[in-house]
Every structure is written in structure tokens, then in C-alpha cells.
Image (cartoon, grey):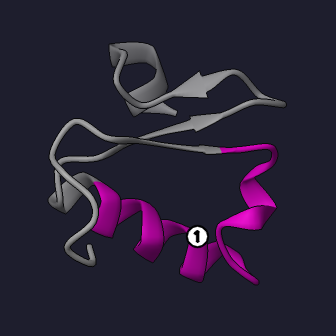
Amino acid sequence: MDGRTRTGDVLTVTMLDRLGRNTREMLEFADRLKTSGMNQHTLNMDIDTSTPGGELL
């Protein structure tokens, strides 16, 4: 993403709406995370994209 991140890093956010202003922005950002090898953990929904169930969501 910006040189300070590495494959396997996890971005933790409190709520999904912190990732973008609309659904399209959130999906684009999530795609960039996946492309860079990073995972996302959303606290209020307990979504962790490093797990198969979290990736599905």
C-alpha cells in the first residue's frame, strides 16, 4: 500500500464505514488490501478476512 505495510499485516477498524464514504469506496479499499496481501479485522461485526468465513463476508 505505502511502503510501511507488509504482506500479512492486519488493518483493524471499529466499523466498516470507517473504510470509505460509500460502498464502492469500501469495496475498492478492501480489494487493494487483498491485492497487497493484507487482512482486515472489523471489530463491531467480528469480520476477520484472514479466516475463510471473514473473507466470504
37 magenta-colored: no
Picture coordinates of residue 33, whole percent (x, y) = 32, 59
Residue at x 44% of width, y 16% of height: 53
- Give whichever of 34, 6 is nearer the camera: 6
26 magenta-colored: yes
- Give whichever of 32, 1 is nearer the camera: 1
Q: Main secondary structure of the magenta part?
A: helix
Q: Please, is residue 13 above or below residue 30 in the view?
A: above
Which of the 4 quarters of the picture holds residue 52? Answer: top left
Picture coordinates of residue 16, whole percent (x, y) = 73, 53
Picture coordinates of residue 13, whole percent (x, y) = 69, 47
22 left or right of 50?
Answer: right
21 left or right of 10?
Answer: right
The residues colored magenta run: 13-33
Callout 1 amino acid: Met
Q: Which residue is tagged 1?
A: 26
Neighbor class of circle 1 (other Cα within 10 Å; few <14, some 14-19, many 20+) is some
Residue at x 80% of width, y 43% of height: 14
